[in-house]
Image (cartoon, rainbow, N blue to C red):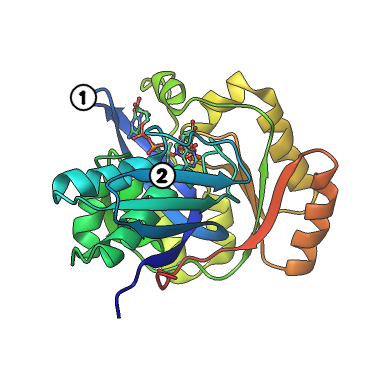
Amino acid sequence: MNETKISIKAPAKINLSLDVLGKRADGYHEVKMIMTTVDLADRVEMTLLQEDKITIESTGGFVPLDHRNLAYQAAMLLKETFHIKKGVAIHIDKHIPVAAGLAGGSSDAAATLKGLNHIWKLGLSLDELAELGAKIGSDVSFCVYGGTAIASGRGEKIQHITAPPPCWVLLAKPPIGVSTAEVYRRVNMNTVVHPDLDGMVDAIEDGSYKTICNKLGNVLESVTLALHPEVKHLKELMLRLGADGVLMSGSGPTVFGLFQHETRANRAYNGLRGFCHEVFAVRLLGEEQEEN
Ligand SMILES: C[C@@](CO)(OP(=O)(O)O)[C@H](O)COP(=O)(O)OP(=O)(O)OC[C@H]1O[C@@H](n2ccc(N)nc2=O)[C@H](O)[C@@H]1O
Ligand SMILES: Nc1ncnc2c1ncn2[C@@H]1O[C@H](COP(=O)(O)OP(=O)(O)O)[C@@H](O)[C@H]1O
């Protein structure tokens, strides 16, 4: 059967630990991070076009609909690398907040790579797609695999680890914009307090939820907090509402809280909605997902 359409789930990520090891000659930073997927996802639908063009549509969320869209860049990268003369219509059903530290755009790009690999019959492995994805952005390689991993280099070197024990994740994005490039630029390597990333890996492997909550750490957090004090207030509020551990994800501004019990997560969700427009209570996915 010749498939002309495919729909792929594109989940958000959070960083349970994020360390910056130094600045590199190419302008990026050497990082070491523990990333895991959560059940808040966009859906990327791709329809084969015989005409040689890429179109983008998106519902719910303000994203560029041209060559700046990371899904467009993923399609163009495959077209150019493999000399594909066909086109694709990409529809993104957007649920992940934009520019939030949740890698929504990177996950859309990863879903596009996986979907087009299928309908353009390219026969590429996940490793090959992840390597291509790194050309689009540092977080795309992780998003190709999903699950839980240690990401190093500038984020593109992926080592899979076991999933953390199941729990609930409350995500809240304050209505402010944060530039990832600026946050990295403001990291002062002389004063950074490194998180205990190895301790977090051990805690995940031991399945120790309590230690995971105690070991949450992100070097970029203090930078974004200094620029936007409301992120700090959000962290404090989430703790007061009963989170077992709280942290900012990536370069922010989204704050996530971990909860062992659904009832508590829902109570905190209701408490936060009055303060923050974009709030979600979701499960940690942690495991690599089936494509669809
Ligand atoms: C901070 C993190 C943590 O997961 O996530 P987000 O907050 O974006 O979700 C990532 O490192 C972000 O990855 P991504 O958003 O793909 O970044 P890229 O497009 O590759 O880079 C954007 C800019 O951030 C800076 N950058 C990015 C990655 C890195 N290891 N060092 C850097 O210095 C560079 O200035 C680069 O030009
Ligand atoms: N498909 C997409 N979804 C979201 N943002 C996108 C997309 N394509 C390009 N962008 C742009 O990428 C930037 C980063 O968005 P996003 O991936 O959501 O955040 P983050 O890098 O903080 O995790 C935004 O400025 C946005 O305009």
What's the residue type where badge 2 is placed?
Answer: Thr
- x 49%, y 52%: residue: 91
Q: Quadrant of residue 281?
A: bottom right
Q: Which residue is mark 2?
A: 55
Closer mark to the observer between disc 2 and disc 1 = 2
Q: Within 8 Å: ligand 2 and the Cβ of disc 2? A: no
Along the line of sight, the residue nearer the viewer: 282 or 15:
282
Check contact, mark 2 vs mark 1: CB within 8 A.
no
> In the image, is residue 222 above or below residue 186?
below
- In the rendered structure, the answer to whether residue 271 lies left or right of residue 10 reads right
Separation of marks 2 and 1 at Cα, in angstroms: 32 Å
Quadrant housing the N terminus? bottom left
Question: Which numbered circle lies on residue 253?
Answer: none
Task: Name the quarter where the C terminus is drawn.
Answer: bottom left
272 over 160 or under it: above or below: above
Residue 156 shows in this picture:
no
Q: At 58% across and 48% down in the image, what residue appears?
A: 96
Report x, y in % for residue 184. 41, 25
> At label 1, which amino acid type do we have?
Asp
Ligand 1 occupies quarter:
top left
Q: Earlier in the sequence, mark 2 or mark 1?
A: 1
Residue placed farthest to the bottom in the image?
1
Estimate the x, y position of residue 142 in percent, counting from the top left: 35, 53
On the image, numbered disc 1 is attached to which residue?
26
Observer-nearest of 179 and 247 = 179
The residue at 55%/35% (across/down) is 252
Q: Is residue 84 left or right of residue 267?
A: left
**Depicted 190 relative to depicted 130: above or below:** above
Say how many tags the image has.
2
